[in-house]
Image (spheres, grey):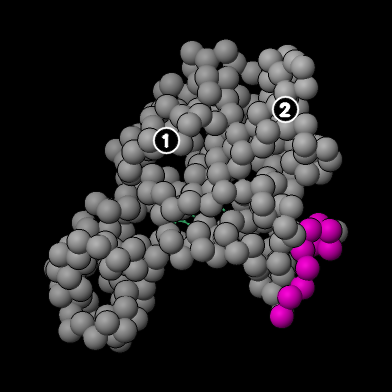
Amino acid sequence: MDKITPAECALFSKYICEVSGISVDPAKAYLFETRLGGLLKELRISSYEALHGRARADATRKLEQQIIDRIATNETLFFRDEKPFELLRHKILPDLIDKRAPRCRGGLPIPIRIWSAACATGQEIYSIAIVLKELLPDLKQYNIRLLATDISGKAIARASSGRFNQFEMGRGLPKDMQQKYFTLQGGDWQINDEIRAMVAFRKLNLLHPFAGLGKFDIILLRNVAIYFNIETRKKVFQKICGVLENDGYLIIGSTESLTSICPDMVPRRYLKSIFYQPQNGSGV
Ligand SMILES: C[S@@+](CC[C@H](N)C(=O)[O-])C[C@H]1O[C@@H](n2cnc3c(N)ncnc32)[C@H](O)[C@@H]1O
């Protein structure tokens, strides 16, 4: 494998942070080598410095995307950490429906807008779609909008396919849900059409403007801010607050906290879970 020099590590660390917000310690030479070495070979580029130069010069940003796809950690699983999904099922969704129902008299469907803002390969948003289907058997009474976005085009393509291998299926998904919502096709498992059709997938970099996204009742931004520095975390969460309804709900990763990052959001506890709501919003 081609060796990366400390100067090249510094170049990539800066570049990756600029384009994605992801902080990679320049001392982690092995990380750059294992994740970008293959790209160097594939494109027959002679050095990491040349790869960096080419990426910066590439107006199509195709190379930038290829680098991000390799650097981003897409680790995820169905019903990750379990508690957020219990929280959705037993607290957030029932409360939200109670709040929205009085505004929808005359048979208007009740709107439920949920955004999984760094969805990786889709297990998070499909877990939510399954929770909705289990909780609300008559989905027609609701105007459900599930959006799942990620910076990685590769991850989004996989998420959108709704296809998972045996290993992925064995991580977090109860067997009865596997039987109910997936079918075996050529060795992989395909999520059923009804669940797949509930979700819109889109590539979106959290550093870029959120123009045109609209507002959400529930946003999940889990296990991504840990890769950002404090300044980037603050900026991203501030933007997230801007697209959350003022009585909406924000769920972050189980090891993450918004203390000193986003004073506009107040933590609320339910059983052993925490969710956040806007400070000046109309609350729970
Ligand atoms: C570890 S996964 C978390 C997936 C899921 N939220 C979960 O908790 O299981 C982190 C995801 O964040 C995405 N990501 C990293 N930087 C991003 C950015 N600037 N904008 C959008 N997504 C980003 C990565 O591509 C990756 O898929």
Residue annotated with mark 2 = 109
Residue 193 picture location, percent across and down: 72, 57
Residue pictured at 31% horizontal, 59% vertical? 24
Residue 189 picture location, percent across and down: 72, 70
Question: Considering only order in the chain, which callout, 2 or 1, is on the residue closer to the N terminus?
Answer: 2
**Residue 145 seen in render:** yes
Residue 190 shown left or right of residue 256 in the figure: right
Total number of numbered discs in the rendering: 2
In this view, 54 is above or below 173 = below
Residue 174 picture location, percent across and down: 79, 58
In this view, 181 is above or below 144 = below
Residue annotated with mark 1 = 212
Packing grade of label 2 (10 A; few <14, some 14-19, many >=20) is some
Q: Identify residue type, mark 2.
A: Pro
Residue pictured at 71% horizontal, 26% vertical? 110
**Alpha carbon separation for disc pair 1 and 2:** 22 Å
Task: Looking at the picture, tell me which residue is in the foreground, 208 or 256.
Answer: 208
Specify the segment rendered in magenta: 177-186
Residue 227 picture location, percent across and down: 39, 51
Residue pictured at 48% horizontal, 51% vertical? 202
Residue 160 lies in the magenta-colored region: no
Where the N terminus falls, by quadrant? bottom left
Instruction: State the SS at label 1.
Output: loop
